[in-house]
Amino acid sequence: MWCRTQNNAEAGHGEGAGGERGVALILVLWVLALLTVLMLGFTGTSHTELLLARNNYQSAQAAAVADAGVSLALVGILDTANGEQWPADGRTRTLPFGDATMDIQVQDEAGKVDLNNAPPDLMAGVFQSLGLGDAGGIAAAIVDWRNRRQPAQQNATGAQASNDAAQEYGAFLSVDELRLVPGVSRAIYDRVRPYVTVYAPIGRIDPLTAPPEVLRGLPGVDPKQLAAFLAARDQLGPVPGALPPLSGVTRFLAHSGLHAATIRSTGTVTGGTRFVREAVVVVNGQNDQPYKFMTWRQGLDEKGP
């Protein structure tokens, strides 16, 4: 009797120990599973952070290359000795920069349509050549906007006072203000922005540096003459007096030399990361301050994703 009871007790004790071992094993498996999940999450987060760091590094590299391209372009347009000055006709120069490349364009602002001074028929012609439906209406709206500038009035103390009867409109200080003109949608603005300026005060077009889209919009231009002119300019460059004449449009044209230019520099690094820098620079021709930046911003990468 005593032996049977003892055996039963030992058997019960063995079953309890086995159950405890089973529970412990399950807990260990749960802990291992939790550690595995945490490790996978940590690995994924680390991988993502590494990718972000690499992308930021490559973007910074591309931006540095693009900025270096702007500096190189400045040297090119300021170097007027021995005919080494870069032509400001919008052509692309592709140059190596270590393991990266830079694509640089210099576009003379005098080759664009000045929003503050261009005659309405010139604006309408260029807008029509760009494919805008209501080219005349857009040109009229721009003229109306710039003409509705209300002069500042002086009060008795000599301080400037605003006109409460009408909103005060100023002349265009930047091309971006074109978006404020009634009827100019985002699509219209994006289409005309590369071909308009506020830095060509004479209001005429320099045919030596103007984009073909602008020259095609000259009211009354002869298409055959223009084709011959553009072909000669592509071959010879913007050389004064060496290109075929453009008759019938001389009232819209004037060559005044480089005063202001848009520099567009695209830096591309290993891996394909790109960065576009756009800057408008005014060339003063002064020894103490040969140039002055008017705008400096990141440009839209037309070849980007």
Image (spheres, grey):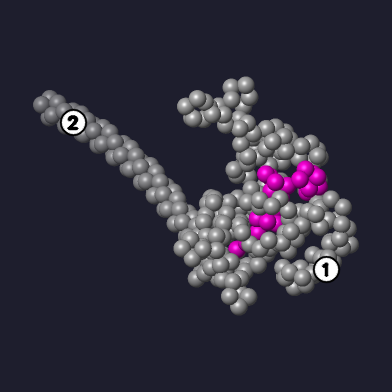
| Residue 153 x, y percent position in the rendering | 57, 29
Quadrant hosting residue 174: top right
Residues in magenta, as a range: 104-127
Q: Disc 2, disc 1: CB below 8 Å?
A: no
- Residue 113 within the segment the image draws in magenta: yes
Q: Position of residue 108 (x, y in %)?
A: 65, 59
Residue 303 in magenta stretch: no
Q: Which of the labelled discs sits on residue 13, or is there none?
A: 2
In front: 281, or 149?
149
Along the viewing direction, whichever of 33 and 271 lies nearer the viewer: 271
Quote the CA–CA distance across marks 2 and 1: 111 Å
Badge 2 density bin: few <14, some 14–19, many ≥20, Cα 10 Å:
few
Secondary element at tag 2: helix
For mark 1, what is the residue? 244
Farthest residue to the top: give it.
Answer: 165
| Residue 177 seen in the figure | yes
Question: Which quarter of the rendering shows the N terminus?
Answer: top left
